[in-house]
Amino acid sequence: MELFEKASGALIDCGRSELTLDDVEVTSEEVVLKPLRLCIMKDCRLPAYSIMKIPVVNHYIEDSGDVVVKGSKLLALKKEVFMPSMLVTLRRGKTDIWVVNGQSQENVIPQGMCVAFTEPFCPDCIATISETSRVPTDITETKQSFEFLKMISPDLDANQKLMLVDVLQEHSEAFKERKNGTLPKLP
């Protein structure tokens, strides 16, 4: 039974007569790369409602490289300690990862506890955002409206102010400076 516990990452709770398997995933692929387990290098105290980096290690690998880390679901369920999926570089099997304590009290993670799993990093599988969206949002429109309102004479009534703001927003490109420092020509 002890060999099964080590191989499967099982947790036996004798008080509740429960057997919990640690992050078992079902797959139909014939060849599966078993994710590497990352374990705590030393006892870590996590203050209530905190986020911090903790040192982890996998003793079975000595090489270095980039990996994708996913937090243990068991740790999230049992201790309310969460980890975002992240890209890290393992150096001789060691790295630091971010953890969040979602409880209102201090949490202690003991040395040797498995807290995360790694998968090989595939650069083609990660999407990156290289530029910001050019689609105006409600927030920018509200900000622009506020800036336009500061330019409007206080002598206008509310309806006239709204009509003027609409016209200014419609032609807001006329107020933007171009890359070469010149203002656009008005029609």
Image (cartoon, helix red, strand yellow):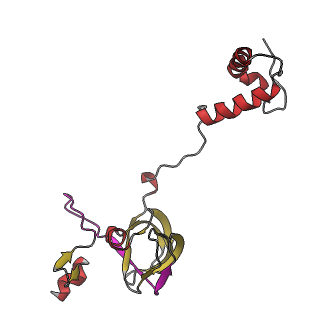
Q: Residue 176, can we see it?
A: no
**Residue at the location (76% across, 22% down)?**
174
Q: Does 156 appear above or below 130?
A: above
Residue 62: image location, x then y, percent? 43, 82
Give the quadrant of the N terminus.
Answer: bottom left
Q: Is residue 6 left or right of residue 70?
A: left
Give the quadrant of the C terminus.
Answer: top right
Q: Which residues are magenta?
A: 23-46
Residue 110: image location, x then y, percent? 40, 85
**Residue at the location (24% across, 83% down)?**
6
- Our reading of the magenta stretch's main secondary structure is loop
Q: Is residue 36 left or right of residue 45?
A: left
Query: Residue 45 lies in magenta, yes or no?
Result: yes
Camera-side residue: 182 or 15?
A: 15
Q: Does 99 appear above or below 5?
A: above
Q: Quadrant of residue 138?
A: top right
Camera-side residue: 93 or 75?
A: 75
Camera-side residue: 112 or 151?
A: 151
Q: Is residue 145 left or right of residue 69?
A: right
Query: Residue 89 lies in magenta, yes or no?
Result: no
Q: Residue 73, can we see it?
A: yes
Q: Which residue is situated farthest in the top direction here?
A: 187
Residue 130: image location, x then y, percent? 58, 45
Residue 34: image location, x then y, percent? 29, 70
Instruction: Count numbered badges in the picture.
Output: 0
Camera-side residue: 122 or 25?
A: 25
Q: Does 19 appear above or below 127?
A: below
